[in-house]
Amino acid sequence: MIWSRQVTGFKGAVGVMMSIRRPKRLDVYTSDEGETSWLVKGGEDLRLDQRVELFYEHVNVLLNQDVQCRQQQLAIKTYTVVRRQPVVVAWSLTV
């Protein structure tokens, strides 16, 4: 995957999520004058996260095939998992 945007700065303080591993949330300014959020997780294997997101994408396909679900616009929000060191999960919505 080729990234066309670059990080130009960070917004405010880092948020600490209230879960077992206490991942950090970063709000980032990008070169296209956009803003995005990232979840940074250290010391974790993200293969399970990737599999769960893939499962959610398959569920969304099934929901979209059902007329009533499609009319109600039912869908699970999915996220891009980027495996880097430290581990980072993009919060850019793909739904």
Image (spheres, rainbow, N blue to C red):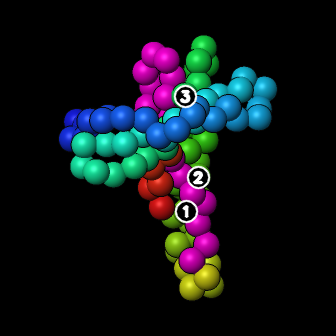
Say few, some or many: other residues with alpha carbon within 10 Å of mark 2 (under 14 / 14 to 19 / 20 or more).
some
Tag in front: 3 or 2: 3
17 vs 74, left or right, is right
Q: Is residue 37 above or below residue 77?
A: above
The amino acid pointed to by label 1 is: Asn
Query: At 58% across and 32% down in the image, what residue appears?
Result: 14
The amino acid pointed to by label 3 is: Val
Q: Quadrant of the N terminus?
A: top left
x, y percent for residue 51: 57, 37
Residue 5 placement: quadrant: top left
Nearer-the-camera pick, 53 or 19: 19
x, y percent for residue 31: 25, 43
| Residue named by callout 2 | 56
| Residue named by callout 1 | 60
Q: Is residue 90 visible?
A: no
Q: Which mark is residue 11?
A: none
| Between discs 1 and 3, the one toward the N terminus | 3
Disc 1 to disc 3, C-alpha distance: 25 Å
Tag in front: 1 or 3: 3
Disc 3 to disc 2, C-alpha distance: 21 Å
Q: Are marks 2 and 1 in contact (CB under 8 Å)?
A: yes
Q: Would residue 75 be counted in the magenta stretch? A: yes
| Residue named by callout 3 | 40
Query: At 42% across and 39% down in the image, what residue appears?
Result: 28
Q: Secondary structure at mark 3?
A: strand
Q: Is residue 36 above or below residue 42?
A: below
Say few, some or many: other residues with alpha carbon within 10 Å of mark 3 (under 14 / 14 to 19 / 20 or more).
some
Q: Secondary structure at mark 1?
A: helix
Q: Which residues are magenta?
A: 73-89
